[in-house]
Amino acid sequence: MVAKLEPTARAELLASLPGWREVDGRDAIEKTFRFTDFKAAFAFMTRVAITADGQDHHPEWSNVYNRVTILLSTHDADGLTERDAKLARVIEEAATGTGLQG
Ligand SMILES: C[C@H](O)[C@H](O)[C@H]1CNC2=NC(N)=NC(=O)C2=N1
């Protein structure tokens, strides 16, 4: 059973991840990415999907045209864990220089 992040680790994680924020009412973090167009957004989602599946840790996400909103939490722990931290860092890499509008 994976352990939830301690408050200090959680704060350090949020400080290290640009634009991610805590979700009201859930032990989770969330960010919306905005791309130049739908194709750039979907290409980003494809890259993330492949890596996430390889880590066996999956995002909760939605896509509207050029925007992708991603929520991370660990279902098995009902909260934020190191698995979410690892996937958030992968997501940030996958978004870099790929038609990202910020
Ligand atoms: C059986 C499978 O390994 C588990 O259900 C994995 C799949 N992907 C997952 N993704 C997330 N976000 N949390 C989990 O606890 C989780 N568990």
Image (cartoon, helix red, strand yellow):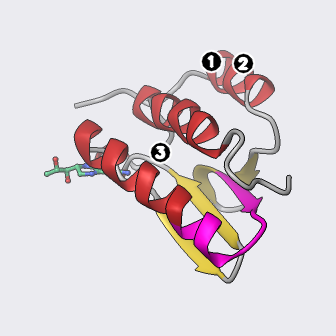
- Disc 2 crowd rating (10 Å Cα; few below 14, some 14-19, many 20+) is few
- Does the magenta segment cover residue 37? yes
- Determine crowd level at label 3: few under 14, some 14-19, many 20+ residues with C-alpha closer than 10 A: some
- CB of residue at label 1: within 8 Å of ligand 1? no
User: Which element type, helix, strand or loop, lies under badge 3?
Assistant: loop
Mark 1, secondary structure of its residue: helix
Q: Kindly report the distance in space between the C-alpha atoms of the residues bearing marks 2 and 1.
A: 5 Å
In magenta stretch: residue 55: no
Mark 1 closeness class: few <14, some 14–19, many ≥20 residues within 10 Å? some
**Label tally:** 3
Which residue is at a point 60% across and 33% down the rendered structure image?
93
> Disc 3 and disc 2: Cα gap in Å?
16 Å
Residue underneath mark 3 = 79
Label 3–label 2 contact, CB within 8 A: no
- Name of the residue lying farthest toward the bottom: 65
Residue occupied by mark 2: 12
Task: Give residue 50's position: percent from left, percent from top.
Answer: 32, 49
Q: Which residue is drawn at the image coordinates 68% and 83% (left, top)?
A: 65
Q: Amino acid at mark 3?
A: Gly
Q: Which SS class for mark 2? A: helix
Badges 2 and 1: C-beta atoms under 8 Å apart?
yes
Q: Amino acid at mark 1?
A: Ala
Q: Which residues are magenta?
A: 30-42
Q: Reading the chain from its start, which is encountered first: label 3 or label 1?
A: 1
Tell me the residue that label 1 is attached to: 9
Does the residue tagged 3 have its C-beta within 8 Å of any atom of ligand 1?
no
